[in-house]
Amino acid sequence: MAVAAALVAVGGATADPTVSSKQAEAQHVLGQINAIDVQLGAAVEAYNNATVHLQKIQSDLRENTFELGVARKNLKRSQAALAKRLVTIYTSGDQNSTLAVLLGASNIDDLVNRMETIHSTSKQDAKIVRDVTAAKIAIQRHRVELQNARSEQERVVAERQAQRQHIEAQLAQRRQLLSSIRSEIAQIKEQERVRQLQLAREAQARLANPSPVGVGAAAPEGSTVAPPSIHGGVVGIAMRYLGVPYVWGGASPSGFDCSGLVMYVFAQIGVGLPHSSYAQYGMGAPVSLSQLQPGDLVFFAGASHVGIYIGGGQFIHAPHTGDHVKISSLSGWYASTFAGGRRI
């Protein structure tokens, strides 16, 4: 979005109709690229969110597989106890035991009803039967849960593959559009580099001399107020990664996507966050625009993009493919698509 604005400024510096026409064409192309970037950001974070979901499914699969094994061992042990008790009943001729009565049951409901009405027979026999029944029920339940988890796993894997193909198609379209205005982009990038250096100096000055923060008026009486921020220190950490390139799925200093940057920075202070802007939006406490403090997360476009608020109406983020970790203002497109803040 800022790139298109910079191109307008460049266009105002010349009156050559040929140059102006080329710049107008480049501005149109940049508008198309910006639209792709918004869609790409949402697609990448949907992919990341599916990955988080898939990890949860895989964890559930492991747990249910373990529990199924436990239930099978319990059934084997209970069946052995039942067999031993039946032998004792047969050899002793005791036809009035709990087991002798219960063996006449036609189904589990009948069995439970019989158990509830028997008061004068062995509690030990009743427990053996309950153990066998419970183990069988547990095995059936875990089998169903495993089947459901495997079906969900297949669905999410297919969903991720479709999202990957969509992202790759959009990236190809973006590269093709960029190649048509390569010289204009080079000029704009240089202007943006100089602007980012100035923004970084201003942010460092604010860190050295903190002052009351917030980007608007105080919250109205009766509104929800989040606890005071305790993670303002992440701002200084995030500043270290200014200039690191955007990389889809990246979560390290070699490259970040938006949620990967947030996850990595907070991990440096021992706070674990999922690698998904959608999942991060469910963390912590909500914060209004007017009550933002350094270290709060800021979300845009339906939580498909996330950054870290640094004070002064600005935030650090990894915007999109072709860009890098940078400082942006909570104005223009970001103000119009602001989805909310979260205090971790």
Image (spheres, helix red, strand yellow):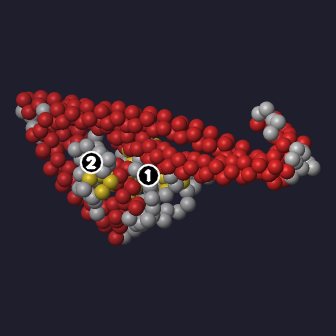
Pointer 1 residue: 274
Q: Is residue 36 visible?
A: no
Check the image and report above or below for 265 versus 15. Answer: below
Q: Position of residue 19 (x, y in %)?
A: 8, 33
Question: Which residue is drawn at the image coordinates 23% and 38% (left, top)?
Answer: 4
Q: As drawn, which residue projects farthest toward the front?
A: 91
Q: CA distance from mark 2 to mark 1?
A: 17 Å
The disc labelled 2 sits on which kind of residue? Answer: Val
The disc labelled 1 sits on which kind of residue? Answer: Pro
Q: As drawn, which residue projects farthest toward the bottom?
A: 208
Q: Nearer the viewer, residue 315 or 129?
A: 129
Horizontal side of 127 relative to 74 (left or right) equals right
Q: Quadrant of residue 30?
A: top left
Q: Quadrant of residue 175?
A: top left
User: Which label's residue is closer to the chain start, 2 or 1?
Assistant: 2
Q: Position of residue 117 (x, y in %)?
A: 90, 42
